[in-house]
Image (spheres, rainbow, N blue to C red):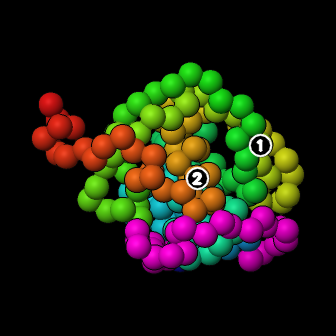
Amino acid sequence: MVRNIIKLGDETLRKISKPMQKFDLRLWLLLRDMADTMYKADGVGLAAPQIGILRRVVVIDVQDEHGLIELVNPEIIAMEGEQAGSEGCLSVPGRRGYVVRPNKVTVRAQDRNGKFFEITGEELLARALCHEIDHLDGIMYVDKMDHEIFDDEENA
């Protein structure tokens, strides 16, 4: 089921999400709905707060060998390097910003069954991991951007 994505200005996006404690059918349905919503919106990631649910749940798909990544209670445990570039958000439609992020991150999370795992991402995946995990703490890319990017600047 495709859910409504809430937009910048909605106070839910600024709240800290609570950890998931039950790994049950409700979580599985939430993960499915989040993936459906992300794909329908042509996004590469979606955090539960973006659909109004203050839980530490994220889905990401940067169209690489990882495919759809489901992260429950994720936390960044290592980061290295630096990358800077254009970033957007499904909750901030039509806008982009110049954001500096780590070039490589390792995240520890749980899967839909509660089993712990680690994933390491570089470049776009690292950016997406940082961006979506920020959402769980009420942080948005507009808080971290150096400046807004306009269409003519991005194509220059």
Instruction: Say if 1 sits above or below 73 in the image.
Output: below
Q: Which residue is mark 1?
A: 108
- 25 with respect to 123 (left or right): right
Q: Quadrant location of the C terminus?
A: top left
**From the viewer's perspective, is the residue at label 2 or at label 1 nearer?**
2
Q: Position of residue 112 (x, y in %)?
A: 77, 60
Nearest to the observer: residue 105 or residue 4: 105
Q: Position of residue 131 (x, y in %)?
A: 53, 48
Tell me the number on the disc at residue 134. Answer: 2
Tell me the SS state at disc 1: strand
Magenta range is 2-26
Quarter of the figure with residue 66: top right
At 68% from the left and 67% from the top, the residue drawn is 17
Q: Amino acid at mark 2?
A: Asp
Q: Amino acid at mark 1?
A: Arg
Q: Can residue 122 be seen in this snapshot?
A: no
Q: Position of residue 79 (x, y in %)?
A: 65, 29
At 79% from the left and 67% from the top, the residue drawn is 20
**Residue 59 lies in the magenta-colored region:** no
Instruction: Say if 38 sits above or below 96 in the image.
Output: below
- 1 with respect to 97 (left or right): right
Quarter of the figure with residue 67: top right
Question: Is most of the magenta stretch helix, strand or loop?
Answer: loop
